[in-house]
Image (cartoon, rainbow, N blue to C red):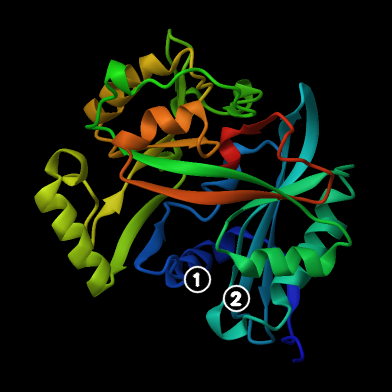
Amino acid sequence: MNGPACEVISYSEAQNHALLQFEKDIVQGGQIQLEIVKEHFLSRAAVFRNFRVFIATNAQNNILGTAIGAETTIEINGEKIQAGFGFDAKVSPDQRRRGLGRKLAKEMYRQFFKPNGLSRNYMTAKLSNAAVLKMISGMLSNVWVYNFTYLTIPTSARMKPSDLSEPSPDNFGVRLFDPQSVGHDYYTLFENGLGCFHSHKMYQLKIKKVKFIYRTALSLLRKYYPSKYQNTPKEGETMSFSVLYNHSIDNLPGINLVLQDLERKGIGYLLVCCKKRGAIYRSLNGISINSYDYNIVTDFHLNESDAVNLDVRCL
């Protein structure tokens, strides 16, 4: 099918309101449909020192799609690498499967990654997001995929000492590289070494709709397992969350201090990224109300056996 007639342009402040509306109208998720809530379109991009926004528009200046590229740090097997990170790639529903996402990605490579000397680049995507994998694989000759998992933990939950798993090798971690490049109000570093990045300052997620079958299942879980599921978000609720970083099985007992601090500040959820079936996952899965699998999708060689530390701003 022929691609849409469009022009890829850079961001201007005059487009902010239209871009916020465009993003709001693109619903994410299946059984639980989510809507992004932001104060400004650049709220997520602005935490990076170097970034660029790409916008696809038609002849009538209607927004058809967006994508953002940023320079970031990723650590692989102990080596810190400057890499390109692509995120917030969105295409209008009536323009999908017409090559627009691929066109935005190509412009990101041509106009941002290459001029900044970023020869290794990646993005993150839900395991179920076949469209992203298809777009990347169609543009590059080689693509590598590295798996990790998100756990969603209500800040009212607490880990019991008996929940702590036996230590085992875990080759995935989350860090905040060059924290001096972001305002202090974006993160909290605790004495136990754990850190918490306040992603809710960049954006929040509103539950626009919960489909009937899933809504019924959640009601039953709240009824029969209230201690775990009583704080499951409901339709119409806006979820605020922070993301854990610097976590390891050695300092994980300090997570309750993080949860207490977030609950006191009115933040509803803590997201923890880890390898599925690893020690962190086994320790926290019992107090998590949801887990979903993600991929790091790269244009450079990356094995599941590699030790990877991802910047928390890229989650």
> Can you give x and y, in whole percent of width and height, for residue 230 in the image?
16, 45
Query: Position of 120 compared to 259: left or right?
Result: right
Q: Is residue 181 left or right of residue 300?
A: left
The N terminus lies in which quarter of the figure? bottom right
Q: Which residue is pictured at 63% across the width and 27% down the height?
A: 181
Disc 2, SS: strand
Label number found at residue 124: none
In primary-sequence order, the first of circles 2 and 1 is 1
Residue 19 drawn at (x, y percent): 53, 66
User: Which residue is located at x 71 percent, y 69 percent?
Assistant: 134
Q: Which mark is residue 63?
A: 2
Q: Quarter-wise, where is residue 131 in the image?
A: bottom right
- As drawn, 141 above or below 148: below
Identify the residue position indicated by label 1 in the image.
22
Residues marked 2 and 1 touching at CB (< 8 Å):
yes
Residue 202 in the image: state x and y as whole percent.
47, 44
At horizontal 68% and vertical 51% (from top left) the residue drawn is 123
Residue 276 appearing in the image: yes
Left or right side of 240 for 169: right
Between the C-alphas of marks 2 and 1, the distance is: 7 Å
Question: Tag 2: Cα neighbours inside 10 Å, few (<14), some, or many (≥20)?
Answer: many
Query: Which residue sits at x=87%, y=59%?
Result: 110
Mark 1 lies on a secondary structure that is: helix
The amino acid type of the residue labelled 1 equals: Phe
> Looking at the picture, does residue 56 appear above or below residue 118?
below
| Quadrant housing residue 98 | bottom right
Q: How many marks?
A: 2
Q: Quadrant of the C terminus?
A: top right
Residue type (three-letter) at the residue carrying disc 2: Ile
